[in-house]
Image (cartoon, rainbow, N blue to C red):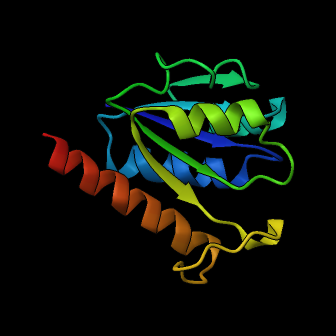
Amino acid sequence: MKIVVIDGQGGRLGKLLVEAVKDRIPQAEVLAVGTNGIATATMQKAGADYVATGENPVDADVVLGPLGIVVAHSILGEVTPRIAEAVGGCRGKKILIPMNSCGVSVAGTQEMGLAGYVKLAADQAEAFLRGAR
């Protein structure tokens, strides 16, 4: 199973997600896509199997195919319209992490810290993979 983690800025959230996924779902292939080189390098150091930078790697259904999971969050101005369209249009399962620091509130979500969001995303990815077998 392929899991794509998308992050920007310094890649801190992406690093935590890569570590959580590799710990909880060791058989998963993790592709980390950073919106910049720093985010990409941070996720690579966290143990991602493959890395890429920018919007072009996200803009392919081969990467975001029907059998994958995409984990992304609201990134302060770093998600281009192309990235948003690619993630929204991919056929795979999407797990989005809301970050209200970007001025976006998602009704129905609970307020929690970064560690809580990472755990919840890993829980959902693991549950999805169990059900997909």
- Snapshot quadrant of residue 99: bottom right
Question: With respect to residue 46, does 60 lie above or below?
Answer: above
Q: Name the residue nearer the viewer: 85 or 4.
A: 85
Q: Residue at x 77, y 44 (%)?
A: 8
Camera sees residue 84: yes
User: In x, y percent, where is residue 12?
Assistant: 72, 53
User: In x, y percent, where is residue 70?
Assistant: 49, 41
Q: Name the residue nearer the viewer: 37 or 46.
A: 37
User: In x, y percent, where is residue 38?
Assistant: 82, 36
Q: Name the residue nearer the viewer: 55 or 129.
A: 55
Q: Please indicate whether residue 37 sits to the left or right of residue 115 in the image.
A: right
Q: Residue at x 63, y 70 (%)?
A: 114
Q: Quadrant of the C terminus?
A: top left
Question: With respect to residue 110, does 106 lie above or below?
Answer: above
Q: Residue furthest right?
A: 77
User: In x, y percent, where is residue 118?
Assistant: 52, 63
Q: Residue at x 73, y 46 (%)?
A: 11
Q: Quadrant of the N terminus?
A: top left
Q: Residue at x 57, y 71 (%)?
A: 115
Q: Please indicate whether residue 69 sits to the left or right of residue 58 in the image.
A: left
- Snapshot quadrant of residue 120: bottom left
